[in-house]
Image: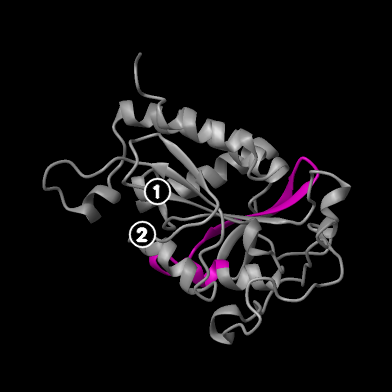
């Protein structure tokens, strides 16, 4: 499918008056300057909390990874895989280029979403996410970052409201490009830790074994449900139960 620039038709459901900046009252222009291309899409105003549980403010869902066939299927690219899976399940075409990213505009249920795969390589992915978040006026609470996590067993997922970067270079760069703010949701995908004295970089750029691949594919399927739940219900008891199940998913009783 040919790549296209963002158009009013592709994301008309996002259009509304732009609210003030949501994650910084004094943004650093070098990080948060609006992209020079594409149309200006604005977020839906935050509804009255008493009006109901569903919030129609758009979500920016970004998977971290490295572009190019060389990195396809490697441990460090599971964030990309998760975004691809969400796009496929929700029928969202990833066919737009904006702010050094491949992205798709669509919805999960009735909630508008922007799916993002930064093309600036892992260590600089925040240079895509920061400007997009500012341009579309997405609040921090609706910026979901998906990435690989070596502190979790392979195929185990974890959803968090906020956190640090845990020495993950991509996540650190995202924080830097959100004015140092850490109060954004994240979905981490366990890829296990390097065996023995194996170099960490070599491990991250390694592909999964056949057994690990099955675990990751299952995790991606479960991750789609987790993202749907988060977008439609927020951080409810459903997410807490999801984390608990994930924590013990490979334990035999």
Residue drawn 51% across the image and 72% down it: 127
Q: Position of residue 181 (x, y in %)?
A: 53, 70
Element carrying mark 2: loop
* Labels in figure, total: 2
**Viewer can see residue 156:** yes
Task: Kindly check if marks 2 and 1 are in contact, taking CB atoms under 8 A apart as contact.
Answer: yes
Q: Please report the residue visible at 24 percent of the width from the left and 55 percent of the height from the top.
A: 201
The foreground one among 58 and 236 is 236
Q: State whether residue 122 appears in this view.
A: no
What residue is shown at x 29% (from left), y 50% (from top)? Answer: 204
Residue 148: assigned label: 1
Q: Is residue 118 magenta?
A: yes
Q: Is residue 103 left or right of residue 8?
A: left
Q: Position of residue 24 (x, y in %)?
A: 63, 77
* Residue nearer the viewer, 152 or 126: 152
Q: Front-most of 15 and 39? A: 15
x and y percentages locating residue 57 in the rendered image: 77, 56
Which quadrant of the structure image shows residue 142?
bottom right
Q: Taking 70 as reference, is 25 above or below it?
A: below
Of 140 and 227, nearer the camera is 140
Q: In screen coordinates, is 119 left or right of 56?
A: left
Please give the label number shown on residue 168: 2
Q: Which residues are magenta?
A: 105-129
Q: Is residue 242 above or below residue 194?
A: above
**Element carrying mark 1:** strand
Q: Is residue 233 left or right of residue 101?
A: right
Residue 140 as seen in the image, left or right of residue 203? right
Query: Mark on residue 241?
Result: none
Q: Residue at x 40, y 34 (%)?
A: 155
Residue 141 horizontal/vertical position (percent): 64, 58
């Amino acid at each position: 499918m040919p790549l296209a620039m963002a158009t009013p038709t592709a994301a008309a459901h996002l259009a509304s008056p732009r609210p003030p900046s949501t994650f910084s009252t004094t943004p650093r222009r070098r990080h948060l300057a609006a992209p020079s291309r594409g149309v200006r899409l604005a977020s839906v105003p935050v509804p009255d909390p008493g009006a109901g549980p569903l919030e129609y403010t758009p979500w920016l869902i970004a998977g971290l990874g490295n572009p190019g066939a060389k990195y396809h299927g490697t441990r460090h690219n599971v964030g990309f895989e998760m975004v691809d899976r969400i796009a496929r399940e929700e029928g969202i075409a990833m066919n737009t280029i904006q702010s050094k990213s491949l992205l798709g505009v669509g919805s999960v249920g009735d909630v508008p979403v922007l799916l993002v795969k930064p093309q600036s390589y892992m260590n600089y992915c925040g240079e895509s996410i920061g400007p997009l978040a500012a341009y579309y006026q997405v609040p921090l609470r609706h910026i979901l970052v998906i990435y690989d996590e070596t502190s979790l067993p392979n195929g185990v997922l974890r959803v968090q409201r906020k956190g640090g970067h845990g020495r993950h270079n991509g996540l650190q760069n995202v924080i830097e490009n959100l004015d140092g703010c850490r109060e954004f949701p994240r979905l981490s995908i366990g890829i296990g830790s390097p065996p023995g004295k194996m170099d960490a970089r070599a491990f991250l750029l390694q592909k999964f074994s056949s057994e690990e691949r099955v675990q990751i594919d299952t995790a991606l399927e479960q991750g789609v449900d987790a993202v749907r739940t988060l977008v439609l219900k927020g951080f409810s008891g459903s997410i807490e139960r999801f984390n608990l199940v994930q924590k013990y998913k490979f334990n035999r009783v």
